[in-house]
Image (cartoon, coloured by chain):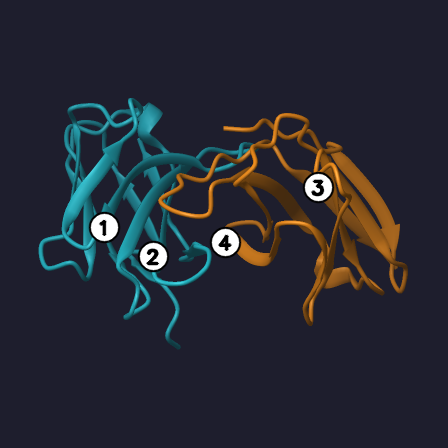
């Protein structure tokens, strides 16, 4: 399967702990996006990378959140000192900027539950 | 970014054609229209994308009138497995953070 993969698929943690999620994009895609989705809502944009450069961050991304894409391939999203409000599905999407238009392809998501 | 309006929910029966209309009155000249499908506990899945007139693929058709202020996603002969949330999005073709609304919950009954 050459789609976007995310790991882990589920994470349960206690408030105050740090968590890290990984996203592996489609191999030839140079853009990578992170979104967050809470129950009953559509996904909300968090941040995106073109190659290894982080080009935009949403104001939803507080100081406790950090994302990296060190070699322009996989990306990690870390949440420090988790809070119950961080409970959500974290989605990764990738796309290619080469072509007539850009289509983002999503991974299965990581569901986070903060107790 | 253009705001979209779509029905909150729709019901259909297996074998019927389903049309979901999305309004986007403030669409910009270079905006494309994209539809995603999402099942519970999964990431959104790209269905179809278009700029004007009609686009068809193996899954759906997308109809866009000349003024581009609305679009209609057409799903032929739906099955129970088409029960999902369908999102209509508009935006520039590149470097675009997708802005999702609440989507349309489609329930297909037997």
Question: How far is mark 4 from mark 2, CA to CA?
Answer: 25 Å
Q: Residue B42 carries which label?
A: 4
Q: Name the residue: 62% across, 26% down.
A: B26
What secondary structure is marked by label 2? loop
What secondary structure is marked by label 4? loop
Q: Earlier in the sequence, mark 2 or mark 1?
A: 1
Instruction: Please give left or right for residue A16 compared with residue B2 in the image.
Output: left
Residue topped by disc 3: B105
Quarter of the image with the N terminus of chain A in it: bottom left
Place of residue A45 in the rendered image (x, y in percent of width and height, measured from the top left): 38, 35
What secondary structure is marked by label 3? strand
Q: Colour of chain A?
A: cyan
Residue topped by disc 2: A97
The reply to whether the C-beta atoms of the residues labelled 3 and 2 are less than 8 Å apart is no
* Tags 4 and 2 on a common chain: no
* Camera-nearest label, 4 or 2: 2
């Amino acid at each position: 399967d050459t789609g976007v993969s995310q790991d882990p698929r589920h994470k349960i943690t206690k408030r105050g702990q740090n968590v890290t999620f990984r996203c592996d994009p489609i191999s030839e895609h140079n853009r990578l996006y992170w979104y967050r989705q809470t129950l009953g809502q559509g996904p909300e944009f968090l941040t995106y990378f073109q190659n290894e450069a982080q080009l935009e961050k949403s104001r939803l991304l507080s100081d406790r959140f950090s994302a990296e894409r060190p070699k322009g391939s996989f990306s990690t999203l870390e949440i420090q000192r988790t809070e119950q409000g961080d409970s959500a599905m974290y989605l990764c999407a990738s796309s290619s900027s080469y072509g007539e238009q850009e289509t983002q392809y999503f991974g299965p998501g990581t569901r986070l539950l903060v107790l | 970014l253009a705001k979209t309006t779509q029905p909150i929910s729709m019901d259909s029966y297996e074998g019927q054609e389903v049309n979901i209309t999305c309004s986007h009155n403030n669409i910009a000249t270079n905006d494309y229209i994209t539809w995603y499908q999402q099942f519970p506990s999964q990431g959104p899945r790209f269905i179809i994308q278009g700029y004007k007139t009609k686009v068809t693929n193996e899954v759906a058709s997308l109809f866009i009138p000349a003024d581009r202020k609305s679009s209609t996603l057409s799903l032929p002969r739906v099955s129970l497995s088409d029960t999902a949330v369908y999102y209509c999005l508009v935006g520039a073709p590149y470097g675009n953070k997708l802005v999702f609304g609440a989507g349309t919950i489609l329930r297909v009954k037997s």
